[in-house]
Amino acid sequence: MTEDLTPAEEAVARTTRQLDARGLRGLAHPLRLQLLNSLRRGGPATASQLGKELGESSGATSYHLRQLAEYGFVEDAPEHGKGRERWWRAVADEINFDARRVDQDDPEIRGATDVLLHEIASTHYRETTSWVADRDRWRNTPWEEAGVFSDRTLHLSADELTELSERLLALLQEYDDRDRTEEGRAEVRVHLHALPVHRESRT
């Protein structure tokens, strides 16, 4: 029931999928994650278009798109089709994953979790290095100094880290709720990493 939700919360509920064990098994493949991310960010596309974009054969992208459809991550977009072309679109705008909600003692689940997290980390790395390589594109524009490329070390309790994470995500949601079509807006990727670090003692 969504009667008690605000309009913004209803929109999130409609477009966010919580990843369960079955979905994790279906998504834990590097190419499937890349395909889903491309559809979520770039909109509907065909297997051939996605293959060209990702440097894969249309046979491989077609197979993995069908697998994503079987697990409910993508669906047909018939309004875009022309003739025999099959167009695909993402079902949800966002995928949430909480490792505590699945059985991490199951070796298969643990392996799938590792694949998922490694591919997410690889995606963030590729996007960051791509920005570094392409940064001259933004020279002498308002975008040149608009972003941030920084890190900071904090000393927090587990409860404080949880609070920080929740406050940052809430702030991001405020900006995500704004009109995406307004003039002057562009796609901006925000990478949020707040992770505990193990450091061996020097003594």
Image: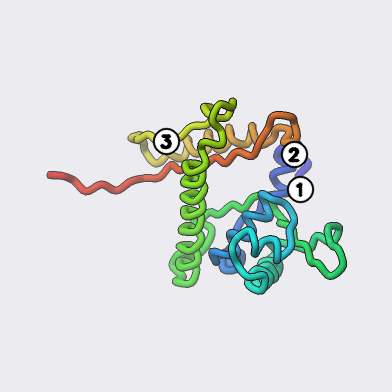
Q: Which mark is residue 160?
A: 3
Which residue lies at the image location 36% right of the left edge and 45% below the top edge?
196
Name the side, left or right, on which 91 lies relative to 163: right
Q: Which residue is mark 1?
A: 1
For the residues labelled 1 and 3, say whether their Cβ atoms are less than 8 Å apart: no
Image coordinates of residue 63 in percent, x first then y, are 66, 73
The residue nearer to you, when weighing 87 against 176, is: 87
Q: Describe the colour scheme in one phrase.
A: rainbow
Which residue lies at the image location 69% right of the left edge and 50% below the top edge?
42
Residue 181, picture quadrant:
top right
Image coordinates of residue 33 in percent, x first then y, are 58, 60
Which residue lies at the image location 59% right of the left edge and 27% below the top edge?
141
Amino acid marked by disc 1: Met
The residues bearing labels 2 and 1 have C-alpha atoms spaced at a distance of 8 Å
Q: Is residue 6 visible?
A: no
The residue nearer to you, when weighing 23 against 63, is: 63
- Report the quarter where the C terminus lies: top left
150 vs 11: above or below: above
